Image (cartoon, rainbow, N blue to C red):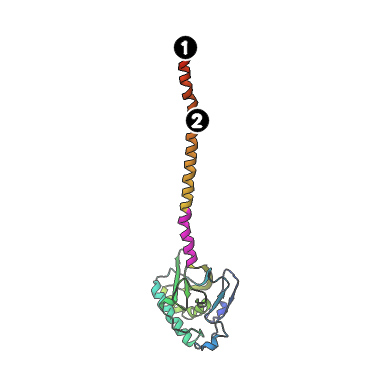
Amino acid sequence: MSDEFDLRDVPVQAPVTRTLLYADSQAGNGSDSDCDDVGVSRLRLDHLGESEEWLVIELSNCPSADASAIQVNVARWMNEECATAIKCCLNATLQQNNVIVGEQYCSQQENFINLLAVKEGDFPPGKGNTINSQLLGAVIHSREHLLSTLLHSDLKSITVRRFSSESDLNYGYEQIPFLNIVLILIFILLCLSVALFIVRQWLRRRSPRDHAHPHIALRSSFS
């Protein structure tokens, strides 16, 4: 990865209708009035409630650190960078719960980890609560060697990708058992209907034969 880094260099995959407010790389946090004119640590999305933009860090090897260690270190790095090198416009010091560790994926083809930072420690992130993922990417890039040591792996790339929020994913998963139950009930009803139809047809075919036997016996008695 190159030594020079600009927030605008962070690629954003899966294009969506959005307005990204890039962070200013001036030193210091800045006052609240300074933040009114620059889009620092803010991300405006037309469909923020439907999805979030995560920072995806691709690694050479499978990450070995636990989520808590990643949260603590990333929060500390953000506080240090925002106090000295990057104008973040954060009103409070970030804590462990301000950093959300998403999926950690390991395979022979790729290894990556998803990160998201929020102003208030809640999940799923509320509208206006998400810290700009490009700002988070700038911090990660400046502390690349430390994160590499923490994860025991070299960093291959840093990208911003849009994923469905956990609430949407949970909603989808919750619907799967319900749909399965409905399909099972429909299948049972169809089986009962077919079985009932077969029984009725069998009874209809047997009924004329039962009525015919007494008639034949009666005719035999008169002959």
User: What is the span of residues highlighted in magenta in the rendered image?
Assistant: 166-179
Q: Which residue is mark 1?
A: 222
User: Mark 2, residues whose alpha carbon is within 10 Å: few (<14), some, or many (≥20)?
Assistant: few
Distance between mark 1 and mark 2 Cα atoms: 30 Å
Is there any visible trace of residue 170 in the rendered image?
yes
Q: Amino acid at mark 2?
A: Arg
SS label for mark 2: helix
Q: Which residue is mark 2?
A: 204
User: Mark 1, residues whose alpha carbon is within 10 Å: few (<14), some, or many (≥20)?
Assistant: few
Where residue 212 sits: x, y (%)? 48, 21
Q: Amino acid at mark 1?
A: Phe
Where residue 125 sits: x, y (%)? 48, 73
From what the image shows, is residue 75 above or below residue 201?
Answer: below
Is there any visible trace of residue 1 in the rendered image?
no
Q: Per the image, is 56 magenta?
A: no
Dominant SS type (magenta)? helix
Quadrant in the picture for residue 48 = bottom right
Residue at the (48%, 58%) spot, across then down: 175
Residue at the (49%, 43%) spot, across then down: 190
Where residue 96 sits: x, y (%)? 41, 77
Q: Which mark is residue 177?
A: none
Where residue 152 sits: x, y (%)? 41, 73
Residue at the (50%, 30%) spot, across then down: 204
Name of the residue lying farthest toward the right = 17
